[in-house]
Amino acid sequence: MRRCSHVRRTGATGYIGGDALVEIVQAHPDWEENITAAVRNSEKGAQVAAVFPKVKLVYGDLDSTAMIEEEASKADIVYREFVMTRPYD
Ligand SMILES: NC(=O)c1ccc[n+]([C@@H]2O[C@H](COP(=O)([O-])OP(=O)(O)OC[C@H]3O[C@@H](n4cnc5c(N)ncnc54)[C@H](OP(=O)(O)O)[C@@H]3O)[C@@H](O)[C@H]2O)c1
């Protein structure tokens, strides 16, 4: 069995990201407690927690550069699935 110690992900409340989270946890139930999901506010966090109570939540958005960098630095896998809301600079 493959092991994974830390997964960081964004877009967990979205269509693709939500489905991906379901698939990941169904395929690897033991990973749930090692998954961290970035959400934009406590309402969105509650939606994730209602389905995945073991998933750790961090709060922020596309502009939360420090949070994204810190969380990514701790991850074995980073899964990004949020909407790109601005053009590339
Ligand atoms: N659905 C498709 O068929 C499809 C096909 C090809 C490509 N894509 C691309 O895949 C990506 C996801 O699509 P989707 O259908 O899953 O979209 P979605 O259902 O609208 O989900 C978007 C996700 O991004 C988050 N998000 C939006 N703006 C954000 C911001 N400024 N900061 C942080 N998070 C933000 C949303 O969080 P909240 O819940 O807080 O709003 C939500 O979790 C998009 O880039 C889309 O263009 C989608």
Image: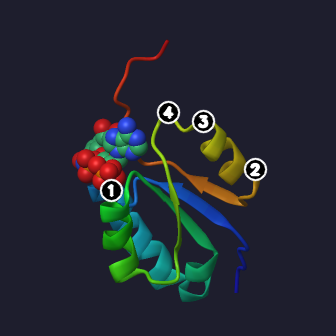
Q: Are marks 3 and 1 in contact (CB under 8 Å)?
A: no
Using the image as rendered, state which of residue 46 and residue 34 is in the foreground.
46
State the colouring used for the structure image.
rainbow
Task: State the separation of the CA atoms marked 4 and 1.
Answer: 21 Å
Kindly state the secondary structure of the residue where label 3 is placed. Answer: helix
Q: Which mark is residue 63?
A: 4
Instruction: Provide the secondary structure element on which disc 4 rests.
Output: loop
In this rendering, which labeled residue sits more in front, label 4 or label 1? 4
How far, Cα to Cα, is label 3 from label 1? 22 Å
Give the farthest residue toward the front. Answer: 42
Q: Counting other residues with Cα less than 10 Å from the Cα at mark 3, is it few (<14), some (14-19), or many (20 or more)? A: few
| Ligand 1 lies under 8 Å from the Cβ of mark 3 | no
- Front disc: 3 or 1: 3
Q: Is residue 83 visible?
A: no
With respect to residue 87, does 16 lie above or below? Answer: below
Which residue is the site of mark 3?
65
Q: Amino acid at mark 3?
A: Thr
Q: Which residue is mark 1?
A: 16
Q: Nearer the viewer, mark 2 or mark 1?
A: 2
